[in-house]
Amino acid sequence: MADVTAFNRKPSTNSAERQLRIDLAAAFRLSAFYDWHEAVANHFSLAVSPDGKQFLMNPRWMHFSRIKASDLLLLNADDRSTMDRPGAPDLTAWSLHGRLHALLPHARCIIHLHPPYATALASLANPEIKPIDQNTARFFNRVAVDLDYGGMANTDAEGERLANMLGNRSIMMMGNHGVLICASTVAEAFDLTYYLERACRNMILAYQTGQKLHVMSDAVAEKTAREWEDDRDQFHSHFTEMKAILDGQDPSYTD
């Protein structure tokens, strides 16, 4: 196994950072639980410094179901020598997450996945999440769409392009690729990911009927989206409950 000590892959003595590590490790385990993962690919990251440039991220090629808090790498988006050091992260992860953390301070927690229903919708010529129910309405006018996939995101230029396209939004449908979710906390990023995948599932199932979609009016869709945003306590309760389930099944993620 590669030497990863250069990236502080060890238990943190800082209590605030340790809790962030535990939360991010829980998100990996839950993604495996829901079958959102892509074997040993895909990546999550979480800022630990006020400017967002120091961040935690999963080590290269480790399965989500095995990740523990102490496994997470501590990286610096301004450290241009990162990929030249022992235990370097995956190049696509560094190119994407490193640039997002450098350029978008509001993106504290960044989740990049290829979950089945969201990826299927992102593969359509029109990957719009139409407001056809409460879940889909949550994302009304709140999703950036990238239809310019050009291969693996393995350059700083591609990371910067995606950061500019995302802007101040929290979610991106990545055409021919997957999804990107950003939030201020792991709890909110997890909740957004959970409901995004369910919303995309509802879209795919509705399309499969072949019948005309009953799309909400813009006014109702916007009202519903704002009602979701006003219920932030639910996001944190959702994540707390899911961590309690993990604790009962396999608490090793906290190690």
Image: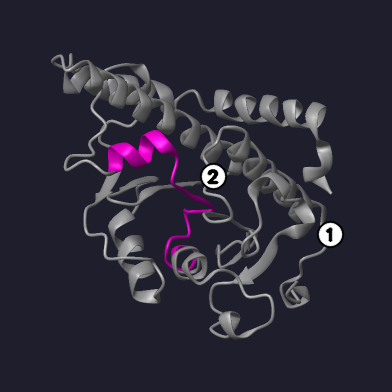
- Looking at the picture, tell me which residue is in the foreground, 104 or 246: 246
Tell me the amino acid under the disc marked 1. Answer: Pro
Q: Which residues are magenta?
A: 100-122
Q: Is residue 49 above or below residue 24?
A: below
Q: Which of the labelled discs sits on residue 11, or is there none?
A: 1
Tell me the amino acid under the disc marked 2. Answer: His
Residue 154, magenta (yes or no): no
Q: Is residue 166 above or below residue 102?
A: above
Circle 1 residues within 10 Å: few <14, some 14–19, many ≥20: some
Which of the two labelled residues, at mark 1 and mark 2, occupies the earlier sequence position? 1
Q: Which of the labelled discs sits on residue 210, or is there none?
A: none
Question: Which quarter of the picture shows residue 90?
Answer: bottom right
Q: What x and y, as percent, mark residue 251?
A: 82, 37
Q: Going 42% across and 66% down the picture, which residue do you hit?
A: 103
Q: Going 53% across and 83% down the picture, which residue do you hit?
A: 80
Question: Which quarter of the picture shows residue 87?
Answer: bottom right
Q: What x and y, as percent, mark residue 66?
A: 73, 48
Circle 2 residues within 10 Å: few <14, some 14–19, many ≥20: many
- Element marked by disc 2: loop
Residue on which disc 2 sits = 37
Residue 101, magenta (yes or no): yes
- Looking at the picture, tell me which residue is in the foreground, 252 or 216: 252
Marks 1 and 2 close (CB-CB < 8 Å): no
Q: CA distance from mark 1 to mark 2?
A: 25 Å
Q: Is residue 63 above or below residue 91?
A: above
